[in-house]
Image (spheres, rainbow, N blue to C red):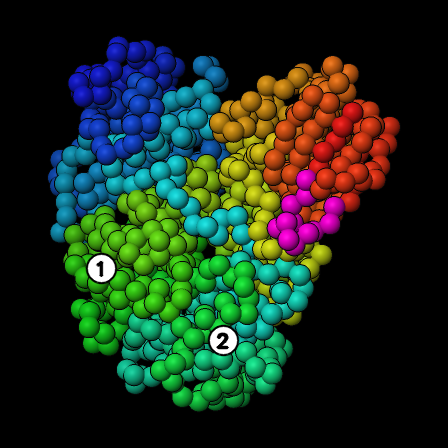
Amino acid sequence: MAPPDDTVNPTLELKSLEKMFDLSDGKFTVRGVPLLSQVPNNVTFSSFSSLCEPRDAPPSILQRVIAASHKGGFFGFSQVSPSDRLTTSLGSFSGRSFLSIFRFKTWWSTQWVGNSGSDLQKETQWVLIEIPETKSYVVIIPIIESSFRSALHPGSDGHVMICAETGSTQVKASTLGAIAYVHVAENPYNLMREAYSALRVHLGSFRLLEEKTVPRIVDKFGWCTWDAFYLTVNPVGVWHGLKDFAQGGVSPRFLIIDDGWQSLNFDGDDPNQDAKNLVLCGEQMNARLHRFDEGDKFKKYESGLLLGPNAPSFNPKTVKELIAKGIEVERLGKQRDKTISCGSDLSEIESRIMKVKKEIEDLFGGEGKECGGCCSKAKESGGIKAFTRDLRSVFKGLDDVYVWHALCGAWGGVRPGATHLDSKIIPCKLSPGLDGTMEDLAVVKIVEGSIGLVHPHQANDFYHSMHSYLAQSGISGVKVDVIHCLEYACEEYGGRVELAKAYYDGLSNSIVKNFNGNGIIASMQQCNDFFFLGTKQIAMGRAGDDFWFQDPNGDPMGVFWLQGVHMIHCSYNSLWMGQMIQPDWDMFQSDHVCAKFHAGSRAICGGPVYLSDSVGSHDFDLIKKLAFPDGTVPKCIYFALPTRDCLFNNPLFDHKTVLKIWNFNKYGGVIGAFNCQGAGWDPKVQKIRGFPECYKPISCTVHVTEVEWDQNKEASHMGKADEYVVYLNQAEELHLMTHKCEPLQFTIQPTTFELYNFVPLTKLGGGIIKFAPIGLTNMFNSGGTIQELEYVEKGAKLKVKGGGRFLAYSSESPKKLQLNGSDAAFEWLPDGKLTLNLAWIEDACGVSDLAIFF
């Protein structure tokens, strides 16, 4: 075995620092504490400074990485024969708590905990191990080297296996010198920042979130058409949806026209005609793009059609009937598959399928009806350009219109011969690592239909052809989905890393040219090669699997337990994704049975808030707790992360853990406590399922010290306060707390929550009066409504955005309170509650000036 290489790259100008790691005699130690035993002789370890060449990182990042470089290094390994898939053990561990992220589907990752290398799941993206002996943590991150991408897998007897693969039998190697990165730190949140900063410098193939500008939708309220329409989306329906929001008093600032707007057809169909009567997601997964402009439903839109008094009406019941019948066809299709496997007669079930399909066709009412019943032929003055122009002419606050597309154009790629590009049908092959992931309709369909792959040499042309047309048509951004299908089709293109580089570079270049460099949301992208190769330009991406309003596999409790699963995905994935992109917690529906549960998490997630409500199906009382009338939201200034006491526990089915997530507002911290118990990943059946025995009330505690104040420069000073007021948003209670006092006890019912606002108390009037502003209590994120705060000699001045009940803690009653320059009435109670009502003043953009004097 090669001894540890502690030579220092002279360009890093490092001084001799504490030796953190040692690999000798089959043991890997961290600060002298054994972490891995039985390390094979073919495994090597090299210090970060011995291998890293400084890249084009900004000086601030480079300096930070240099300062912490002694805390990191690389595992490598070799084997005798070259292969496109190299596997070895990195050693074994047991009896140590770990937190990991693994891919449970091709596209999606989630949290997993355990205490042994054998407890890991296949396709693990990183593992964080607790080292209580030194009060520190170690992370092992499988990375990319040359054309190889790696992941961790479970081994027997506590062994941690690493698998590095190219995805192409034509690309092989026998030795890898830096295929996994190891980093140690005393703070788990600092650890993730330091580790991914080091990898940013080492790889030079991605950029950190701090280097990029996030899309302007980040602090806005929006609407996505997906759950409202699925593939039936059309201009008239979208128009009426936006109109509903406007009439309800909260107008979306951004719109995402999801899947269903494109020009798609199937192999064997007329190459110049769009596929008809598509309803649900699985139906179009074998379809291919045959034009880069909009499909007929949008292409036939006539300019000004919806502006006049005779604008077409829209019946949302028809869409709901279509969706219901689409679900029925999907269910019958599963029954047919079972019938085939049993060798039984298919005639009855085939007859039922044909009957329902005929009912769907009748509901669409023919070609004209499918495009909204508004037009019959395309006009040069119409189409999606006219539609977006008409939208903006009426819905003045609509800043952004995004549209959906798959990374390869459509789910099935681009139809060969239909465009000027060189597209070829490529059979799909799944890597062995994906065998242990959850069965997925999308994967089944894509493998069944193959991918019409545009040659990677034309990736720049491909994306620019799509995006330049959209940009000229008034589209300001794209939601790019189905990202990891490239790994299925990389055999003849140099493997998954090389193919991904070409596509991500082409995508990034087009985003710069057409969408202001940041008009993109990445989705179905939760695998490490995307983050290491695809995030040079992309600054926002989905942090979790889709919002599922019910369990697609038929569990009646799934309508409840799936909602907690979604929050676990988002919060734990943000630990690593948040280093590179702004985590996007996805849409939900305001009329869902668990809508309030979702709303509480979105309010403090730190990203955009958007819905997928069906037309006419809204809970505006709930929506107005999330968004202001002008379509902005009181956004936290960071992204939400799990508290330390949740890191190595299982908030889904351990019977005891409440998910707690922390974040900051400008003038306080917040912890959201969510009872997500009742479901989770089951390794035996390889799927996420319900654990009904865990769906019950859970008791827990919360304390001000659980807010990680030092993780944000703007918030760090607030962590040093002597005393805080704690406001419980749902219970409407006030408490006082210090760093040393006992935590608050609470019990939370299943799929419910509480939001704890921690605001530093300031002493006024010579130290006699204690004061702290809470904000508008009718908003979930009360603290986010405070825009400015200034303490003066005898009081405080504030700017508060929104209308509703303003609350502050004040140990004594003020002598005077002024609202927008005039004396105003207020209420003060002996328990310290100081309140007054604020109105939304349109001319002031909803901002009120408060001056409180003692």
* Residue 289 against residue 629 in the figure, above or below: below
Q: In this view, does 81 lie to the left or right of 790?
A: left
Asked whether 688 or 751 is in front, the reply is 751
Q: Residues within 10 Å of mark 1 (few under 14, many from 20)?
A: many
**Nearest-to-viewer mark from 1 and 2:** 2
User: x and y percent of residue 730 in the render?
Assistant: 73, 42
Asked whether 437 or 257 is in front, the reply is 257
Asked whether 22 or 563 is in front, the reply is 563
Q: Is residue 500 left or right of residue 239?
A: left
Which residue reaches farthest right? 830
* Residue sitting at x 40%, y 59%: 477
Of labels 1 and 2, earlier in sequence is: 2
Task: Measure how far apart labels 1 and 2 are at the Cα level.
Answer: 30 Å
Residue at image mark 1: 459
Residue 48 image label: none
Name which residue type carries label 1.
Answer: Ala
User: x and y percent of residue 286 in the render?
Assistant: 35, 71
* Residue sitting at x 55%, y 85%: 363
Q: How crowded is mark 2: few (under 14 residues within 10 Å), some or many (20 or more)?
A: many
* Residue sitting at x 57%, y 67%: 242
* Residue sitting at x 59%, y 64%: 613
Local secondary structure at mark 1: helix
User: x and y percent of residue 523 in the render?
Assistant: 41, 54
Residue at image mark 2: 235
* Residue 215 against residue 618 in the figure, above or below: above
Asked whether 797 or 205 is in front, the reply is 797
Tally of marks: 2
Quarter containing the C terminus: top right
Q: What stretch is highlighted in magenta?
A: 838-849
